[in-house]
């Protein structure tokens, strides 16, 4: 018999980032659902053809140990002498969220890749994922780190000696998009599930689990500032997909990886 690749049996795919969704869309693996009700969602949070829809915002900002004397407010604070050899950050070579964060920061603030060069010169350590950063900062091995918001916010509520900052320039975000597979055996039910994820009820569920809801008008979890105070920086998912190898290579050159 010919060696054929079986179609996936799932109806809905829910993953971390839209960059991967862009690749799946380009391969024709997603079913467009342009009729989905996106009331309350910024146009940047769903595909224009209805191929995928963001379900929450997981931003990356700065975590610091409460023993630190410098309280950061800006990304550039991590390049100050007070942060010398005291910065932990996830590597975009191993973390998808870290790659999106790197792409976002190099595309938006005026410093671009020079910011990352300054971090490397200031002794920043890039390895592992977000959990490794939390361990290093909460344990006092490092005083500062780049990290996704919910980890230090949750741990601070439990008494860990950490605090989280949304930098003034803005933050990157992964949005855990959901999509219907083109091979879905139950597309009508899949559409109903997408409808639930985007609804007020579905978004309130995301908030109750400690995440920033993607839909406007839903209260944020405890420990977060008002939604209007969180500036999410834009990034081009299609360009990030096209330039993934080049971005990883440039990061690796800067940090000697």
Image (cartoon, grey):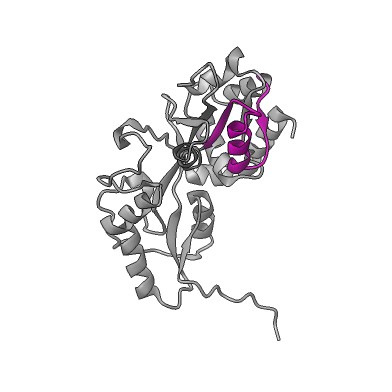
**Which quadrant is the N terminus positioned in?**
bottom right
Question: What is the residue that sits farthest to the front in this orientation?
Answer: 159
Residue in front for this viewpoint, 26 or 252: 252
- Residue 18: % across, % down: 48, 50
Q: Residue at x 35, y 41 (%)?
A: 222
User: Does the magenta portion include 143?
Assistant: yes
Name of the residue lying farthest toward the bottom: 1
- Residue at 61% across, 36% down: 133
Q: Residue at x 50, y 42 (%)?
A: 151
Q: Residue furthest top?
A: 81
The picture quadrant where one finds residue 23 is bottom right
Q: In the image, is 132 to the left or to the right of 109? A: right
Q: Where does the magenta region start and end? A: 122-147
* Placement of 180 over or under 144, stated as above or below: below
Magenta-drawn stretch contains 207: no
Q: Residue 160, how many percent across, how many down?
A: 52, 35
* Quadrant position of the C terminus in the picture: top right
> Which residue is nearer to you in this view: 231 or 244?
231
Closer to us: 58 or 82: 82
């Amino acid at each position: 018999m010919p060696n054929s690749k079986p179609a996936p049996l799932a109806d809905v795919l829910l993953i971390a980032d839209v960059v991967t969704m862009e690749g799946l869309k380009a391969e024709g693996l997603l079913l467009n659902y342009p009729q989905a009700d996106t009331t309350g969602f910024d146009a940047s949070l769903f595909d224009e053809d209805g191929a995928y829809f963001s379900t929450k915002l997981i931003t990356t900002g700065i975590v610091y140990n409460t023993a630190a004397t410098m309280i950061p407010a800006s990304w550039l604070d991590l390049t100050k002498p007070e942060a010398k050899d005291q910065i932990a950050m996830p590597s975009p070579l191993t973390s998808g969220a870290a790659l999106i964060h790197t792409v976002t920061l190099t595309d938006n603030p005026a410093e671009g890749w020079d910011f990352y060069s300054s971090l490397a010169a200031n002794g920043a350590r890039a390895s592992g994922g977000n959990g490794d950063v939390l361990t290093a900062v909460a344990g006092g091995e490092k005083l500062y780190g780049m990290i996704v918001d919910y980890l230090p916010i949750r741990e601070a509520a439990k008494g860990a000696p950490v605090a989280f900052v949304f930098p003034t320039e803005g933050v990157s975000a992964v949005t855990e998009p959901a999509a219907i597979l083109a091979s879905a055996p139950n597309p009508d039910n899949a559409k109903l599930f997408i409808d639930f994820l985007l609804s007020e009820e579905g978004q309130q569920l995301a908030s109750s689990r400690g995440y920033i809801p993607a839909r406007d008008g839903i209260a944020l979890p405890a420990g977060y500032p008002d939604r209007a105070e969180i500036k999410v920086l834009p990034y081009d998912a299609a360009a990030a997909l096209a330039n993934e190898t080049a971005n990883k290579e440039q990061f690796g050159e800067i940090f000697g990886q």
